[in-house]
């Protein structure tokens, strides 16, 4: 028997804003937002409660947005271009605070660690292929206390 539960698709809402092919998408862990990455060098954020327009447009530098990941705690979102650039956004600042990782190489993928302490970026290159690990930096002050 063939399972037909997932064989029927229904368009719920057309999304307008991107001007080319989309390559990536990701859901925020709380399920209220999702992001789409496109050949037009943008990542758009969508609120599922109102899909009439995107709530933010984030731009890459050189190429299509090919990969998008939210951290498991929902505090960060990373987007990757095909080569050389990964952009990390602070979700709590409405994506206004960002960090850019600039390196040389074709990006084969990326992922946050489950505890959100590291971001891993795969680099595809016949000679220098590697897995880069970026660790989160914490700025503790004397007012912080640990028990």
Image (spheres, rainbow, N blue to C red):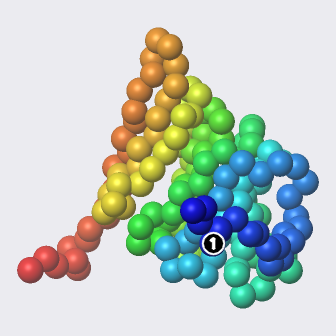
Q: Crowding near pointer 1: few (<14 within 10 Å), some, many (20+)?
A: few
Residue occupying image coordinates x 54% and y 34%: 108
Residue 98 at what x, y percent from top left?
58, 59
72 vs 134: above or below: below
Q: Residue at x 60, y 62 (%)?
A: 2
x and y percent of residue 144 in the render? 22, 77
Is 75 left, or right, of 44 in this rendering? Answer: left
According to the image, label 1 marks what residue? 5
Seen as rendered, the residue at the extreme bottom is 49
Q: Which residue is situated farthest in the top direction here?
A: 127
Task: Determine whether 47 is above or below 18 in the image.
Answer: below
Q: Circle 1 — which element?
A: loop
Q: Which residue occupies the foreground of this view, 6 or 80? A: 6
Instruction: Tell me residue 120's x, y (percent).
Output: 41, 44
Quadrant location of the N terminus? bottom right
Relative to 99, does residue 93 appear above or below in the rendering? Answer: below
Q: Position of residue 39 (x, y in %)?
A: 80, 45
Quarter of image, res 86: top right
In the rendered structure, the answer to whether residue 77 lies left or right of residue 135 reads: right
Closer to us: 109 or 134: 109
Quadrant of residue 47 within the rendered picture: bottom right
């Amino acid at each position: 028997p063939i399972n037909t539960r997932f064989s029927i698709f229904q368009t719920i809402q057309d999304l307008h804003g991107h001007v080319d092919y989309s390559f990536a998408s990701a859901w925020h862990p709380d399920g209220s937002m999702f992001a789409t990455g496109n050949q037009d060098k943008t990542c758009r954020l969508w609120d599922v409660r109102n899909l009439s327009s995107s709530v933010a447009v984030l731009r890459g530098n050189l190429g299509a947005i090919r990969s998008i990941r939210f951290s498991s705690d929902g505090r960060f979102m990373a987007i990757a271009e095909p080569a050389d650039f990964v952009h990390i956004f602070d979700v709590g600042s409405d994506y206004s605070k960002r960090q850019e990782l600039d390196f040389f190489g074709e990006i084969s993928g990326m992922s946050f660690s489950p505890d959100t302490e590291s971001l891993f970026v795969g680099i595809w290159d016949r000679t220098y292929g590697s897995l880069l690990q970026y660790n989160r930096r914490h700025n503790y002050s004397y007012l912080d206390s640990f028990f």
